[in-house]
Image (cartoon, grey):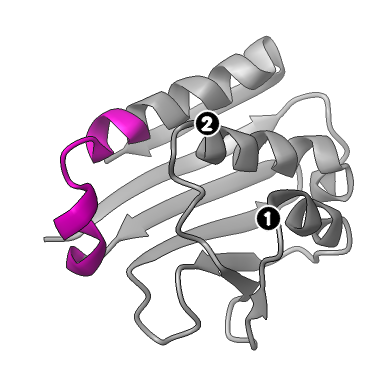
Amino acid sequence: MKVLLRIQDLYFLDSKPAWWQDPRYLRSVLQALDQTGLWRPFGYYGPEGSKRRKIDSLEGLVKASTVFKEKTYSLVTQDVETPAAQLDLDLKPGALTVRLGFQPAFLKDHRENLVSQLVDLVVRLKDAWGPRVVIGPLVNV
């Protein structure tokens, strides 16, 4: 069994098109992951199809993100082809698509609270931005 959270999309209503150049936005997403206990497994990141870099810290990744381009960036547990957990952040003008997937290797140790953590993550993202973010039209686990 594989578990996937998909948020399509987070629309940042008060942002410029290249919203990721302002660290507040991605920081709020990563902090919500951290607050729910879902940040811990991620150790590498990179644009889709490129070599991955080691994540030194949440703040280090936020700082690096200010020079990201309009594309999909993946955060993974290990620098391997099939990581146990993967977070895809699809950066688009004014919006972000989030896909957070967990493979059976991850689930065997984290299954008990995972669904409630995913629900908590969505609530925290909404609470962080209030009326300045629109979530949807699709959010599903």
Q: Whole-percent x and y of residue 51?
A: 64, 88
Type of secondary structure dominating the magenta stretch: helix
> Residue at horizontal 69%, vertical 51%?
58
Q: Whole-percent x and y of residue 43?
A: 56, 67
Q: From what the image shows, is residue 59 above or below residue 120? A: below
Query: Does the magenta segment cover residue 117?
Result: yes
Q: Whole-percent x and y of residue 14?
A: 82, 24
**In the image, which residues are magenta?**
104-118
Q: Which residue matches tag 2? A: 35
Q: Is residue 91 left or right of residue 65?
A: left
Image-quadrant location for residue 23: top right
- Residue situated in front as seen by the camera: 23 or 134: 23
Discs 1/2, front? 2
**Secondary element type, mark 1:** strand
**Secondary element type, mark 2:** helix
Q: Amino acid at mark 2?
A: Gln
Q: Is residue 58 left or right of residue 37?
A: right
Q: From what the image shows, is residue 138 above or below residue 21? A: above
> Residue at horizontal 62%, vertical 66%?
73
Q: Which residue matches tag 1? A: 91
Query: Does the magenta segment cover residue 4?
Result: no
Q: Is residue 122 left or right of residue 93?
A: left
Q: Earlier in the sequence, mark 1 or mark 2?
A: 2
Quarter that holds the C terminus: top left
Q: CA distance from mark 1 to mark 2?
A: 22 Å
Q: Amino acid at mark 1?
A: Leu
